[in-house]
Image: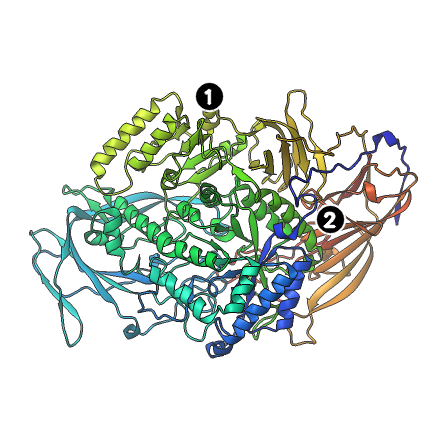
Amino acid sequence: MSLIVTLLTNPSFAQERPSLDPSIPGVLSPKPENSAMFRWWLPAAEVEEAVIIRQLEAVASAQFKGVELCIHMGDTRYPRTRMRDSGWGSTRWNALYKTILKNANRLGLQVDTTISPAWPAAVPSITPEDMAASQELRMGFSEVFSGTYTGELPASRAFSSNIMPPPPGAPGFGEADAGPNNMLREVEEPDRNPERLVAVTAARVIGAEEVEKTVLAAWGDMHHEARTLRKTATLLDSGGMLVVRDPIVDPRTGEYSIRWTPPDDGQWQLFTFWARGTAQQNKEGASTFRPNYVIDHLSKAGAEALMQFWERHLLDAETRQLLRENGGALFEDSLELEYGGLPWTPDLLAEFKRLRGYDLTPYLPLFLDNRVNGLGNDELNLNELGSAEGEYSSLGDRIRNDFREVLTELYISNHLQPLQQWAHSLGLSFRAQAYGLGVDIVRAAMAIPGPDGESLGFGPSVQGDDRFRMIAGGAHLRGGAIVSDEVGAIANEGYRLTWLDMLQWTNKNFAAGANQMVFHGMAYSDSNASRWPGISPFGFGLAGYWGPRNPDWQHIEQLAHYFSRVQAVLQRGVAKVDLAVIHFQYGTSAPVVEDQSLASAGFTYDILTPAALNTVSDQVEQGVLLPGGPAYKAVVVPSQKFLSVESATQLRRLNEHGVKLAFVGETPNQVPFYSDHASQDSELRSIIDTLLRQETVVHVESIDQLPPALNKLEVSPELEFLPPQGGLVSVRRHIDGNDAYFLYNPGTEPLRSHLQLQRRGMVHRVDPWTGAVENLNAESNGHLLISLAPGEATLLFNALATRSKGISEPVVNRSPRYEELDNWSLKVENWQENKATEQSSDTHKSLVDVGTTALVPWKSIRALGEAVSGIGGYRTELQLSEWVTGNRAVLALGSIGDSSSARVHINGRQVPINLFSLEAEIGAYLHQGLNVIEVEITSPLGNRLISEGAITAPPWDATVNVEYEDYGLLGPVSLSLF
């Protein structure tokens, strides 16, 4: 099978492969230390050392950076009693930890270690009644009454809405076999976790009113959703909130009673507040001999309990030395904290009064049914404040904001900072997913050297996720270099997620500020409960599972090189960002900027909270905020009601020092906090009114009006898209006096865009797949033209300080000769369970010689059938009557359907290929005469697992599509010869 082509060649059209100035190392020659990492799930020490070493060697040989070690007992059935010998902190685990560190150090791999098994942070050295354990405040309330109340104190109640909901694809609370994210808590005996009475209060009831609020909610791969919720709330008189003293306790039974007469004959309600341990344990199964209880994330006692467990049970002199030699990080995973009431800590009332200046106690009834620990503010409250006339007041929201402010302060000062300092003392960095508790996540990200985000909890966005812009914004304010991303936990895609799918997520998150990918994940091979193809900690419902068990691991070095090149750029130098967008919020209830107009015009932006901006607002030079850091050219205040007088004063000071301001939509008119709110509301409005009269301040009605308004203020993006290109997103790094850009097309169509650089030196484009360098010359109007395939990203380098050496000027190629290659033979290595062995990870591989074939899905080829998954080898021949070394030839594969990856060999030599465009420059690999073209396609294991009934639509979501997918080279395959 061969194609005969006759060419008229001319050496004058030969193109020399350019080279790049080595001022940005690791771009042309990828280095493992710049590449991605794998979350590595181990079933405690229920492993074989030889298998552990092989897995580490596989990661190293694939040229990845390292692993993030996590004990995870999913897909196992080891009893808790067995954890005495193999659980976290056991002698066997500690020996295994040393083995991992020794071999990682030998192989040059970084090891980041999850700070306790699974998540959240927990230790087996505490019990729920310990003050170091996670605490909650449960509430009880009486019926509405008038006159004297006599009787038992109202008992506490648990509110299920306070518990963070499971992600899509997981069963609800209390269901058996909790699936991909076990949300269950063990039932505790009441006498082992007694309640402590904290306060009794009373409130005058003045009526009820339907309250309406707009909330934002998103989970996983659901789209961000803004919803208007309504709830009939009981109105409590803001002037009638009282603390009730001296309840009576029966010394024999310990039960409380009270006799209380209100100060008037109105309608009253009595409230009780009881503190207790949450009794929450780490998720995903028993990994310690004793129950592993979640620590208090708001007290120093909680952090101390975690550090002391490490010091006493995990760290000896040898382990300390191995950790210091490795230089990795301690990592705290998801804050999926579960409360049957209000998040609490023993000193909270005292700390609240110290930090906010008033007593929270009488206002505790405002927190009934208030979920402050979720990813978004998606609950309304049972009680709200009203005036004496019975009208609804927003004062309750201001008190709740004070509470969230205190949570933020306690979480940062009592949890994040001590753990960071302790990790540093061990020679390690500290990474954390510092969200999920309803805190100011920008300030939390500022507090640590390694803020981390995730694809599951943050969700998709066309522009790149605003939630990542918040995490990255905190890192940029701190001056931090690394923003990591737990990427690939995609619901209902187990063993069907491809690397091309993953790349859509990684590129999206790169474009929003992440710069260190940590893939979710790679598991140990076998357990006493696993099925083929090996341990799958989240079942087959949640992706992803990477490693040698998958056919696409055969091509993994291409992925490693891609991430190495991109991250070598995004982790170097300083992030430069055009705009600071400030938005008052707690938690991650983004998006803030839903309209794409800013990104379409080329503007880059961070999303900051006002309190975070306050910490750096004194760093202004020549109208630029943080000139040595992100160098914001303007501050944007999108539509919002709340802003503190302190933040408004800082905006005025910034403007007085030359920083341009832009307001969009509703301008702030209320302070967010309770103390002195009436006078501060007036002062806030005065400051805003003054700002709006300034020549260097604009006010527009919507985001789409913002780019031209900013242009009038002479604020332009450093890299402008002409005309504005919907969806195109850029990231800029300033490296050694030069600028580097990451450009990403998140759309489903090819994109061609003209670019205008405010400062232009020598500009060249680097393909992160191949390392190929293309010099971009400006057109007559000074614009640069760039093309990107759907989902494709590229790197641009703008040499400002020095001109890069060795970049050849582009030559003009004559029109190519186009040929379609349609004469292929195919052999498929078919992967399936090896049923002749007891090991669940063993795979039987058999070769199917299809012979000559059309380029159609494997499931349509009779010799293969629907179930076949594995590696397909395609071969064809090309006869060239003449060929001059240096001539260009571009091989385009067309489509690979639902396959995971492709690799190309020409005459036995591997050729770099761009997996988004599916094009490869093969001119340097061709020669006169007969040429052999081989294309290797890998598939996921999904079709095989579907055929065996392992992957089905889950019972909680029958709409999930589990049809057989299209694997194989689908073409059309073409060759363009220049």
Q: Residues within 10 Å of mark 2 (few under 14, many from 20)?
A: some
Instruction: Look at label 1 and name its amino acid.
Output: Lys
Q: Earlier in the sequence, mark 2 or mark 1?
A: 1
Of residue 463 and residue 847, the one placed in the foreground of this image is 463
Q: Nearer the viewer, mark 2 or mark 1?
A: 1
- Rendered view: 526 above or below 432: below
Percent x, y of residue 698: 40, 25
Q: How is the image coloured?
A: rainbow
Q: Which residue is mark 2?
A: 970
Instruction: Look at label 2 and name its amino acid.
Output: Leu
Q: Looking at the image, do the residues carrying marks 2 and 1 touch, with CB atoms under 8 Å apart?
A: no
* Point 29% across, 62% down: residue: 158
* Point 52% across, 50% down: residue: 484
The answer to whether residue 184 of the structure is visible from this angle is no
Q: Which residue is mark 1?
A: 712
Q: Is residue 819 left or right of residue 301?
A: right
